[in-house]
Amino acid sequence: MTNAYDQSPQEANRTRAHWALVALEAFGNETGQNYFDGTLSVDEAELREVAGDLLADLFHLARINDVLPEVITGAAYLHFEAEVAEEEAPGEAPANVAHCPACAGPMRYVIGQPHTCADCGGHLPGGTNAGPGRGWEGKNGWLLVVELDDEEDEEI
Ligand SMILES: [Zn+2]
């Protein structure tokens, strides 16, 4: 068995996709839908058909056990969103990361988006100053506070 937690988020999500493929292959063996070749490259129409049938049958199993299908799809979607987000998350915040004015959490830097606190989701108000002789710099997904050298200081 592969342990997804020892892998990078990208590798872990490919491992999860592989587990789903194993389930679809086993399901297809039972229903006669033997469309898979063991790779993660699956035809869209065949994926819709077999994955849709497997989900419908999971809902039948849930119904027999007094569980609503929405409970399963809701939990699945939460896991899926969080696992995709892990692929986009930067590593640990560096020491000179800018801090959230509301909770002092580390601020994320994403090009074209407002700076957002990694902990509370709060934003840095527009026009916030980094402090005397200091400026902002975005690096590796974090908003950093950097010392400006004298020349830059004079320009401002
Ligand atoms: Zn915050």
Image (spheres, rainbow, N blue to C red):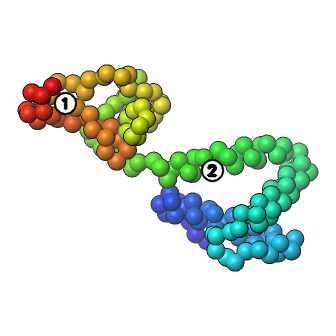
Residue 38 left/right relative to 118? right
User: Which circle marks residue 80 in the picture?
Assistant: 2
Task: Say which label, 1 or 2, has the lower sequence index.
Answer: 2
Examine the rendered structure and indicate whether residue 143 appears above or below residue 19.
above
Q: Which residue is mark 1?
A: 134
> Is residue 126 shown to the viewer in this render?
yes
Quarter of the image where one finds residue 39: bottom right
Query: In terms of secondary structure, where does tag 1 sit?
Result: strand
The residue sitting at 70% across, 45% down in the picture is 75
Instruction: Residue type at mark 1: give it.
Output: Arg
- Residue 117, horizontal then vertical, whole percent: 42, 32
Please rate how many residues cluster around mark 1, counting C-alpha atoms within 10 Å: few if below 14, some from 14 to 19, many from 20. Answer: some
- Residue 37, horizontal then vertical, whole percent: 69, 78
139 and 2: which one is in front?
139
The residue sitting at 41% across, 37% down in the picture is 112
User: Which part of the image, by quadrant, shows the C terminus?
Assistant: top left
User: Which circle marks residue 57 in the picture?
Assistant: none
Examine the rendered structure and indicate whether residue 94 appears above or below residue 115.
below
Residue 60 left/right relative to 36? right
Quarter of the image where one finds residue 135: top left
Instruction: Residue type at mark 2: give it.
Output: Phe
- Residue 11, horizontal then vertical, whole percent: 52, 64
| Count of labels in the image | 2
Separation (CA) of disc 1 from disc 2: 40 Å
